[in-house]
Image: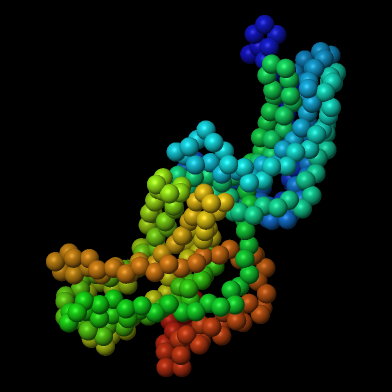
Protein backbone atom coordinates (compact mmCIF):
# COMPACT_ATOMS: atom_id res chain seq x y z
CA UNK A 1 0.00 0.00 0.00
CA UNK A 2 1.23 3.52 -0.77
CA UNK A 3 0.82 6.35 1.72
CA UNK A 4 1.28 10.03 0.68
CA UNK A 5 2.45 8.94 -2.74
CA UNK A 6 5.28 6.81 -1.36
CA UNK A 7 5.59 3.05 -1.82
CA UNK A 8 6.58 0.60 -4.48
CA UNK A 9 5.51 2.05 -7.81
CA UNK A 10 7.11 -0.67 -9.96
CA UNK A 11 7.61 -4.44 -9.93
CA UNK A 12 10.92 -6.11 -10.78
CA UNK A 13 11.29 -9.59 -12.23
CA UNK A 14 14.58 -11.40 -12.95
CA UNK A 15 14.42 -14.03 -15.71
CA UNK A 16 17.40 -16.21 -16.70
CA UNK A 17 18.04 -16.65 -20.43
CA UNK A 18 18.21 -20.44 -20.15
CA UNK A 19 15.44 -20.81 -17.56
CA UNK A 20 13.52 -23.34 -19.69
CA UNK A 21 16.48 -25.68 -20.18
CA UNK A 22 18.66 -25.19 -17.10
CA UNK A 23 18.60 -28.01 -14.58
CA UNK A 24 17.22 -27.37 -11.09
CA UNK A 25 18.50 -28.81 -7.82
CA UNK A 26 16.80 -29.33 -4.49
CA UNK A 27 18.27 -27.30 -1.66
CA UNK A 28 17.31 -27.04 2.00
CA UNK A 29 16.09 -23.66 3.21
CA UNK A 30 16.75 -22.19 6.64
CA UNK A 31 13.41 -23.44 7.98
CA UNK A 32 14.18 -27.02 6.90
CA UNK A 33 11.98 -27.10 3.78
CA UNK A 34 13.35 -28.18 0.39
CA UNK A 35 12.92 -25.93 -2.63
CA UNK A 36 14.19 -26.22 -6.20
CA UNK A 37 16.62 -23.64 -7.56
CA UNK A 38 18.46 -23.17 -10.85
CA UNK A 39 21.76 -25.08 -10.70
CA UNK A 40 25.09 -23.51 -11.70
CA UNK A 41 28.74 -24.56 -11.61
CA UNK A 42 31.98 -22.66 -11.21
CA UNK A 43 32.94 -20.65 -14.30
CA UNK A 44 29.48 -20.68 -15.90
CA UNK A 45 28.02 -17.48 -17.34
CA UNK A 46 24.91 -16.06 -15.63
CA UNK A 47 22.75 -14.03 -18.02
CA UNK A 48 19.16 -12.94 -18.37
CA UNK A 49 16.72 -10.06 -18.32
CA UNK A 50 15.44 -7.65 -15.70
CA UNK A 51 11.82 -6.71 -16.35
CA UNK A 52 10.65 -3.46 -14.75
CA UNK A 53 6.85 -3.13 -14.82
CA UNK A 54 5.30 0.21 -13.85
CA UNK A 55 2.26 -0.20 -11.61
CA UNK A 56 0.75 3.07 -12.84
CA UNK A 57 1.19 3.24 -16.64
CA UNK A 58 1.57 6.80 -17.84
CA UNK A 59 3.02 7.96 -14.53
CA UNK A 60 6.74 8.65 -14.56
CA UNK A 61 9.15 6.82 -12.27
CA UNK A 62 12.16 8.88 -11.30
CA UNK A 63 15.25 6.94 -10.24
CA UNK A 64 18.94 7.35 -9.43
CA UNK A 65 20.02 4.38 -11.55
CA UNK A 66 19.12 0.74 -12.11
CA UNK A 67 21.66 -2.04 -11.46
CA UNK A 68 21.94 -5.80 -11.03
CA UNK A 69 24.42 -7.58 -8.76
CA UNK A 70 25.68 -11.15 -8.56
CA UNK A 71 26.55 -11.92 -4.93
CA UNK A 72 28.03 -14.86 -3.06
CA UNK A 73 27.85 -14.44 0.68
CA UNK A 74 28.21 -16.26 3.98
CA UNK A 75 25.88 -15.53 6.88
CA UNK A 76 26.65 -16.79 10.38
CA UNK A 77 23.42 -17.11 12.35
CA UNK A 78 24.96 -15.81 15.59
CA UNK A 79 26.14 -12.69 13.71
CA UNK A 80 23.18 -12.00 11.45
CA UNK A 81 23.91 -8.33 10.98
CA UNK A 82 27.12 -9.06 9.06
CA UNK A 83 27.04 -10.65 5.63
CA UNK A 84 30.48 -11.75 4.45
CA UNK A 85 30.60 -11.34 0.67
CA UNK A 86 33.21 -13.38 -1.22
CA UNK A 87 31.78 -12.62 -4.69
CA UNK A 88 30.34 -9.22 -5.57
CA UNK A 89 29.79 -8.21 -9.22
CA UNK A 90 27.74 -5.22 -10.41
CA UNK A 91 26.29 -4.25 -13.79
CA UNK A 92 24.67 -0.84 -14.33
CA UNK A 93 21.52 -1.23 -16.42
CA UNK A 94 20.37 2.42 -16.60
CA UNK A 95 21.77 5.80 -15.66
CA UNK A 96 19.81 8.14 -13.33
CA UNK A 97 16.71 9.43 -15.07
CA UNK A 98 13.07 8.45 -15.38
CA UNK A 99 10.99 5.62 -16.74
CA UNK A 100 7.80 6.52 -18.58
CA UNK A 101 6.88 2.94 -19.47
CA UNK A 102 7.68 -0.64 -18.52
CA UNK A 103 11.11 -1.69 -19.75
CA UNK A 104 13.36 -4.76 -20.07
CA UNK A 105 17.12 -4.71 -19.49
CA UNK A 106 19.58 -7.42 -20.57
CA UNK A 107 22.47 -8.48 -18.33
CA UNK A 108 25.36 -10.93 -18.50
CA UNK A 109 27.98 -11.94 -15.93
CA UNK A 110 30.58 -13.84 -17.97
CA UNK A 111 32.38 -16.95 -16.63
CA UNK A 112 31.57 -16.15 -13.02
CA UNK A 113 33.84 -17.59 -10.37
CA UNK A 114 31.78 -19.55 -7.84
CA UNK A 115 34.41 -21.09 -5.57
CA UNK A 116 32.22 -22.74 -2.92
CA UNK A 117 29.18 -25.01 -2.80
CA UNK A 118 25.82 -23.61 -1.65
CA UNK A 119 25.17 -24.70 1.92
CA UNK A 120 22.49 -24.28 4.58
CA UNK A 121 23.50 -25.63 7.98
CA UNK A 122 22.74 -25.40 11.68
CA UNK A 123 24.68 -22.17 12.25
CA UNK A 124 25.68 -20.91 8.83
CA UNK A 125 24.36 -20.29 5.33
CA UNK A 126 26.32 -19.85 2.08
CA UNK A 127 24.18 -18.53 -0.76
CA UNK A 128 24.47 -17.09 -4.26
CA UNK A 129 21.86 -14.70 -5.62
CA UNK A 130 21.08 -12.03 -8.19
CA UNK A 131 19.73 -8.72 -6.89
CA UNK A 132 18.20 -6.08 -9.16
CA UNK A 133 17.76 -2.60 -7.65
CA UNK A 134 16.05 0.61 -8.76
CA UNK A 135 17.75 3.32 -6.67
CA UNK A 136 15.40 6.04 -5.49
CA UNK A 137 15.73 9.07 -3.25
CA UNK A 138 13.55 7.74 -0.45
CA UNK A 139 13.03 4.01 -0.93
CA UNK A 140 14.85 1.63 -3.27
CA UNK A 141 12.93 -1.07 -5.12
CA UNK A 142 14.75 -4.42 -5.27
CA UNK A 143 14.23 -8.09 -6.12
CA UNK A 144 16.43 -11.12 -5.41
CA UNK A 145 16.71 -14.48 -7.20
CA UNK A 146 18.60 -17.28 -5.43
CA UNK A 147 20.56 -19.90 -7.34
CA UNK A 148 22.34 -23.06 -6.18
CA UNK A 149 25.99 -23.84 -6.91
CA UNK A 150 27.52 -27.35 -6.86
CA UNK A 151 31.28 -27.87 -6.81
CA UNK A 152 32.54 -30.84 -8.82
CA UNK A 153 35.75 -32.73 -8.15
CA UNK A 154 37.76 -35.22 -10.14
CA UNK A 155 38.46 -38.78 -9.06
CA UNK A 156 41.24 -38.64 -6.43
CA UNK A 157 44.45 -40.25 -7.68
CA UNK A 158 45.67 -41.11 -4.20
CA UNK A 159 42.92 -42.80 -2.24
CA UNK A 160 44.47 -45.00 0.39
CA UNK A 161 42.48 -47.44 2.51
CA UNK A 162 41.78 -46.79 6.19
CA UNK A 163 43.06 -49.27 8.75
CA UNK A 164 42.41 -48.83 12.46
CA UNK A 165 42.41 -50.79 15.70
CA UNK A 166 40.12 -50.64 18.71
CA UNK A 167 41.53 -52.25 21.81
CA UNK A 168 41.15 -52.62 25.55
CA UNK A 169 44.12 -54.38 27.06
CA UNK A 170 43.51 -58.14 27.55
CA UNK A 171 39.78 -57.68 26.84
CA UNK A 172 39.15 -56.60 23.28
CA UNK A 173 41.14 -56.24 20.08
CA UNK A 174 39.39 -55.35 16.83
CA UNK A 175 40.84 -54.30 13.49
CA UNK A 176 38.70 -52.61 10.91
CA UNK A 177 39.50 -51.58 7.38
CA UNK A 178 37.70 -49.46 4.79
CA UNK A 179 38.59 -49.63 1.10
CA UNK A 180 39.06 -45.85 0.66
CA UNK A 181 39.38 -42.62 2.61
CA UNK A 182 37.67 -40.46 -0.07
CA UNK A 183 34.16 -41.18 -1.35
CA UNK A 184 31.87 -39.45 -3.81
CA UNK A 185 28.33 -38.70 -2.64
CA UNK A 186 26.82 -41.77 -4.36
CA UNK A 187 29.65 -44.13 -3.48
CA UNK A 188 29.64 -47.37 -1.48
CA UNK A 189 31.78 -47.80 1.62
CA UNK A 190 33.22 -51.30 1.48
CA UNK A 191 35.08 -52.66 4.48
CA UNK A 192 35.55 -55.49 6.91
CA UNK A 193 36.00 -55.93 10.64
CA UNK A 194 38.21 -58.56 12.28
CA UNK A 195 37.75 -59.73 15.89
CA UNK A 196 41.21 -60.72 17.10
CA UNK A 197 40.42 -60.88 20.83
CA UNK A 198 36.98 -60.86 22.44
CA UNK A 199 36.75 -61.27 26.21
CA UNK A 200 33.86 -58.92 26.85
CA UNK A 201 30.29 -59.67 25.85
CA UNK A 202 29.41 -57.39 22.96
CA UNK A 203 25.70 -57.29 22.17
CA UNK A 204 25.53 -54.63 19.48
CA UNK A 205 27.78 -52.99 16.91
CA UNK A 206 27.09 -50.20 14.41
CA UNK A 207 28.75 -47.64 12.15
CA UNK A 208 27.50 -44.06 12.23
CA UNK A 209 28.18 -41.32 9.72
CA UNK A 210 28.59 -38.09 11.64
CA UNK A 211 28.55 -34.63 10.10
CA UNK A 212 30.42 -31.97 12.08
CA UNK A 213 29.80 -28.32 11.27
CA UNK A 214 32.31 -25.87 12.74
CA UNK A 215 31.70 -22.11 12.63
CA UNK A 216 33.60 -19.11 13.91
CA UNK A 217 37.21 -18.61 14.93
CA UNK A 218 39.24 -18.37 18.13
CA UNK A 219 37.10 -18.25 21.28
CA UNK A 220 33.88 -18.04 19.24
CA UNK A 221 33.99 -21.53 17.74
CA UNK A 222 30.77 -23.54 17.59
CA UNK A 223 30.59 -27.27 16.82
CA UNK A 224 27.37 -28.98 15.73
CA UNK A 225 27.37 -32.78 15.38
CA UNK A 226 24.61 -34.46 13.42
CA UNK A 227 24.26 -38.22 12.97
CA UNK A 228 23.43 -38.68 9.28
CA UNK A 229 23.22 -42.48 9.20
CA UNK A 230 23.28 -45.52 11.46
CA UNK A 231 24.29 -48.86 9.97
CA UNK A 232 23.91 -51.94 12.16
CA UNK A 233 26.81 -54.31 11.63
CA UNK A 234 25.96 -56.95 14.16
CA UNK A 235 23.38 -57.84 16.77
CA UNK A 236 24.80 -60.55 19.01
CA UNK A 237 28.13 -61.71 20.34
CA UNK A 238 31.09 -62.13 17.96
CA UNK A 239 33.73 -64.80 18.40
CA UNK A 240 37.49 -64.61 18.03
CA UNK A 241 38.67 -64.88 14.44
CA UNK A 242 35.33 -63.76 13.01
CA UNK A 243 35.31 -61.32 10.08
CA UNK A 244 32.30 -59.17 9.19
CA UNK A 245 31.95 -57.46 5.79
CA UNK A 246 30.54 -53.92 5.52
CA UNK A 247 28.72 -52.36 2.59
CA UNK A 248 27.27 -48.93 3.26
CA UNK A 249 25.55 -47.13 0.36
CA UNK A 250 25.84 -43.34 0.62
CA UNK A 251 23.34 -42.40 -2.11
CA UNK A 252 20.34 -42.57 0.22
CA UNK A 253 21.66 -39.98 2.66
CA UNK A 254 21.54 -36.20 2.54
CA UNK A 255 25.15 -35.05 2.50
CA UNK A 256 27.34 -32.35 1.00
CA UNK A 257 30.96 -32.55 -0.09
CA UNK A 258 33.52 -32.04 2.67
CA UNK A 259 34.06 -28.28 3.11
CA UNK A 260 37.29 -27.22 4.82
CA UNK A 261 37.84 -23.70 6.16
CA UNK A 262 35.45 -22.03 3.71
CA UNK A 263 36.51 -18.37 3.44
CA UNK A 264 37.92 -18.77 6.98
CA UNK A 265 34.34 -18.85 8.29
CA UNK A 266 33.20 -22.49 8.58
CA UNK A 267 33.95 -26.14 7.87
CA UNK A 268 31.81 -29.24 7.27
CA UNK A 269 33.52 -32.58 7.88
CA UNK A 270 32.33 -36.18 7.93
CA UNK A 271 33.39 -39.04 10.18
CA UNK A 272 32.85 -42.79 10.34
CA UNK A 273 32.14 -43.70 13.95
CA UNK A 274 32.44 -47.38 14.94
CA UNK A 275 30.33 -48.04 18.05
CA UNK A 276 30.35 -51.21 20.21
CA UNK A 277 27.95 -51.72 23.11
CA UNK A 278 28.46 -54.48 25.67
CA UNK A 279 25.87 -56.23 27.83
CA UNK A 280 26.38 -53.69 30.61
CA UNK A 281 25.55 -50.86 28.17
CA UNK A 282 29.12 -49.58 28.08
CA UNK A 283 30.03 -47.95 24.78
CA UNK A 284 33.33 -48.27 22.96
CA UNK A 285 33.94 -46.22 19.85
CA UNK A 286 36.55 -45.14 17.35
CA UNK A 287 36.20 -42.26 14.92
CA UNK A 288 37.84 -41.69 11.56
CA UNK A 289 37.44 -38.75 9.19
CA UNK A 290 36.50 -39.44 5.56
CA UNK A 291 36.48 -37.00 2.65
CA UNK A 292 33.30 -36.64 0.56
CA UNK A 293 33.29 -35.12 -2.92
CA UNK A 294 30.75 -34.48 -5.67
CA UNK A 295 31.11 -36.20 -9.01
CA UNK A 296 29.57 -34.95 -12.26
CA UNK A 297 26.70 -36.85 -13.88
CA UNK A 298 28.92 -38.02 -16.76
CA UNK A 299 31.40 -40.60 -15.52
CA UNK A 300 34.31 -41.46 -17.77
CA UNK A 301 34.99 -45.16 -18.29
CA UNK A 302 38.55 -44.75 -17.04
CA UNK A 303 37.19 -43.53 -13.70
CA UNK A 304 34.91 -46.52 -13.14
CA UNK A 305 37.73 -48.80 -14.31
CA UNK A 306 40.08 -47.27 -11.73
CA UNK A 307 37.41 -47.73 -9.05
CA UNK A 308 36.99 -51.42 -9.95
CA UNK A 309 40.75 -52.03 -9.83
CA UNK A 310 41.02 -50.26 -6.46
CA UNK A 311 38.17 -52.36 -5.05
CA UNK A 312 39.72 -55.62 -6.26
CA UNK A 313 43.10 -54.64 -4.91
CA UNK A 314 41.58 -53.92 -1.50
CA UNK A 315 39.49 -57.04 -1.22
CA UNK A 316 42.35 -59.33 -2.27
CA UNK A 317 42.16 -62.68 -3.96
CA UNK A 318 41.04 -64.59 -0.86
CA UNK A 319 37.99 -62.47 -0.17
CA UNK A 320 37.18 -61.24 -3.68
CA UNK A 321 34.81 -64.12 -4.44
CA UNK A 322 32.89 -63.57 -1.23
CA UNK A 323 32.35 -59.88 -1.98
CA UNK A 324 31.38 -60.63 -5.59
CA UNK A 325 28.77 -63.09 -4.33
CA UNK A 326 27.54 -60.47 -1.90
CA UNK A 327 27.26 -57.84 -4.65
CA UNK A 328 25.29 -60.30 -6.84
CA UNK A 329 22.86 -60.83 -3.99
CA UNK A 330 22.57 -57.04 -3.53
CA UNK A 331 21.84 -56.49 -7.22
CA UNK A 332 19.25 -59.25 -7.31
Q: How are the colours assigned in the image?
A: rainbow
Q: In which quarter of the image is the N terminus?
A: top right
Question: Does residue 127 lie above or below 258 as drawn?
Answer: above
Residue placed at 46% from the left, 90% from the top?
Answer: 316
Q: Nearer the viewer, residue 156 or 215?
A: 215
| Residue 274 pos. (x, y %) | 33, 69
| Residue 6 pos. (x, y %) | 68, 12
Residue placed at 39% from the left, 69% from the top?
Answer: 288
* 167 relative position to 280: left or right: right
| Residue 226 pos. (x, y %) | 39, 54
Question: Does residue 205 lie above or below 120 as drawn?
Answer: below
* 243 relative position to 38: left or right: left
Using the rendered view, name the quadrant where residue 330 is placed. Answer: bottom left
Residue furthest bottom in the image: 318
| Residue 196 pos. (x, y %) | 26, 85
* 91 relative position to 146: left or right: right
Q: Is residue 21 visible?
A: no
Q: Which of 298 and 257 is in front in this view?
A: 257
Amino acid sequence: MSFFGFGQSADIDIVLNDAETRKKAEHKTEDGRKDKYFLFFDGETVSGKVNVTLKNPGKRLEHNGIKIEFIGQIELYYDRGNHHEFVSLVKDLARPGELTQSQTFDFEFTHVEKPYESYTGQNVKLRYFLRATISRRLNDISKELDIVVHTLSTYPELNSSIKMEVGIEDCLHIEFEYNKSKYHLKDVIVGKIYFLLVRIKIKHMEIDIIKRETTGTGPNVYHENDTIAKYEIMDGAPVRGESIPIRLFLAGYEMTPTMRDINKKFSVRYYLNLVLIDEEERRYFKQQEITLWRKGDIVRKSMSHQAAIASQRFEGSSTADRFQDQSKEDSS
